[in-house]
Image: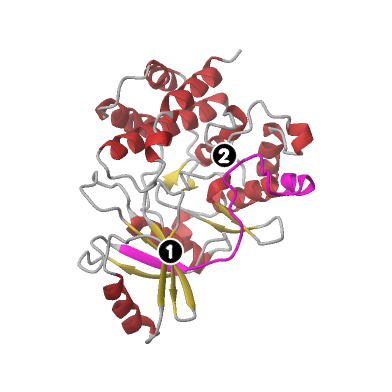
């Protein structure tokens, strides 16, 4: 363990001994990179797990809902072939670690934060992108009611409700005003597609950095970070996953402006086509869906900046990530006003 934990590791050790049998050693390592729920590798004897918990401090109602994460993971693991880690236990009593937490099995694999995939041989990059598209299509093919998730969110009018939610969060933020974000908040409801009634399990943060790929093969072995998941429209995830084509490398690892032919990274149209080849019948992706994704991520960055100012952000780089809100808002406005 390389850093001080904000909870009692000895109490956790005793708890795990009671649940899984005594083990002489408990190893804990915090996983860097997450902006929301603190996440740790846990090695208890020979058992290798991942622990996710709520951050300490006062939280917004409904935020950091790890109970929902655990529920959707269990439903998907038990009833589908969508690649997710095996959930082990949910512990809602705050007394042990200061917040509720859950444990899942640790899956071995590769995570890529940079969408240019610089650490991957060029000939493998297209296959990794296409594997991500196919994993998304597999998730969206699941019928929520068939796996006990009919009440996992409110079906219908997804984008209208989401625009209202994220606009409300932006308006309530104490951050300095961002003109592009205000403009997007006005453009989106004015250009809302007609609701087609499509309902799927929407991951809410479906992107390369939340995919765990097989150690050597171009195959998704686990979709991670389900905090924002709900019943929603499949095109919300698809639009969100298209953001790298509209953001620069210094904007959360996008690929805008790079020589994608030399990189052997697929064009957005090819990625979207691969999704539709595997997906159940879904309406066409429109610029609205990508602009909405950039708007939502901009508001998420605003929230990260707000938490950083109060010292309640989960990641060490939260203060530097916050300024990306304006850049993502401008990228979204570029998509919205493209001719």
Q: In the orientation shown, which residue stands out farthest toward the top?
A: 339
Quadrant housing the N terminus: bottom left
Where residue 306 appears, as percent x and y from the top left, is 29, 35
Where residue 170 appears, as percent x and y from the top left, is 32, 28
Q: Secondary structure at mark 2?
A: helix
Query: Does residue 319 sit above or below 111 in this rendering?
Result: above
Q: Is residue 283 visible?
A: no
Residue for point 29% across, 39% down: 307
Where residue 209 appears, as percent x and y from the top left, is 55, 47
> Image quadrant of residue 189?
top left
Quadrant housing the C terminus: top right
How was the colour assigned to the protein in this rendering? secondary structure
Residue for point 41% across, 62% down: 2
> Image quadrant of residue 300?
top left
Query: Cβ–Cβ below 8 Å for labels 2 and 1?
Result: no
Residue topped by disc 1: 29
Give the mark toward the camera: 2 or 1: 1
Question: Magenta stretch: residue 244 in it?
Answer: no
Mark 2 / mark 1, whichever is N-terminal: 1
Image mark for residue 58: none
Please tell me how crowded label 1 is: few (under 14), some (14-19), or many (20+) other residues with Cα within 10 Å: some
Residue for point 73% across, 32% down: 260
Front one among 206 and 252: 252
Residue for point 26% across, 74% down: 11
Q: Is residue 326 left or right of residue 337?
A: left
Give the extent of the magenta segment.
101-127
Residue topped by disc 2: 241
Q: In the orientation shown, which residue stands out farthest toward the bottom?
A: 22
Where residue 157 appears, as percent x and y from the top left, is 40, 34
Could you give the CA–CA distance between mark 2 and mark 1, rounded to whole angstroms? 29 Å
Front one among 193 and 202: 202
Q: Is residue 317 left or right of residue 339?
A: left
């Amino acid at each position: 363990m390389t850093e001080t934990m904000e909870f009692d590791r000895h109490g956790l050790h005793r708890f795990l001994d009671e649940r899984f049998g005594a083990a002489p050693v408990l190893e804990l390592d915090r996983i860097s990179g997450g902006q929301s729920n603190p996440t740790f590798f846990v090695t208890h004897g020979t058992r290798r797990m991942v622990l996710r918990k709520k951050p300490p401090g006062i939280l917004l109602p409904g935020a950091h809902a790890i109970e929902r994460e655990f529920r959707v993971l269990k439903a998907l693991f038990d009833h589908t072939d969508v690649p997710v880690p095996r959930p082990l236990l949910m512990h809602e009593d705050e007394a042990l670690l200061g917040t509720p937490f859950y444990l899942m099995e640790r899956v071995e694999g590769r995570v890529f934060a940079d969408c240019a995939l610089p650490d991957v041989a060029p000939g493998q990059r297209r296959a990794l992108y296409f594997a991500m598209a196919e994993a998304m299509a597999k998730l969206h093919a699941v019928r929520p009611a068939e796996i006990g998730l009919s009440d996992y969110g409110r079906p219908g009018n997804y984008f209208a409700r989401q625009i209202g939610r994220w606009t409300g969060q932006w308006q309530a933020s104490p951050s300095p005003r961002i003109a592009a974000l205000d403009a997007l908040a006005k453009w989106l409801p004015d250009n809302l597609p007609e609701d087609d009634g499509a309902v799927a399990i929407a991951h809410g943060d479906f992107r390369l950095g939340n995919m765990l790929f097989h150690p050597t093969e171009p195959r998704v072995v686990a979709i991670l970070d389900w905090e924002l998941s709900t019943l929603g429209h499949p095109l919300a995830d698809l639009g969100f996953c298209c953001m790298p084509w509209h953001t620069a490398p210094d904007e959360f690892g996008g690929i805008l402006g790079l020589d994608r032919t030399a990189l052997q990274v697929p064009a957005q149209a090819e990625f979207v086509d691969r999704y539709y080849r595997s997906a159940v019948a879904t309406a066409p992706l429109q610029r609205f869906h990508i602009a909405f994704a950039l708007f939502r991520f901009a508001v998420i960055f605003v929230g990260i900046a707000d938490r950083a100012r109060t010292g309640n952000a989960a990641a060490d780089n939260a203060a530097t990530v916050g300024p990306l809100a304006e850049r993502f808002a401008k990228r979204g406005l570029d998509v919205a006003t493209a001719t």
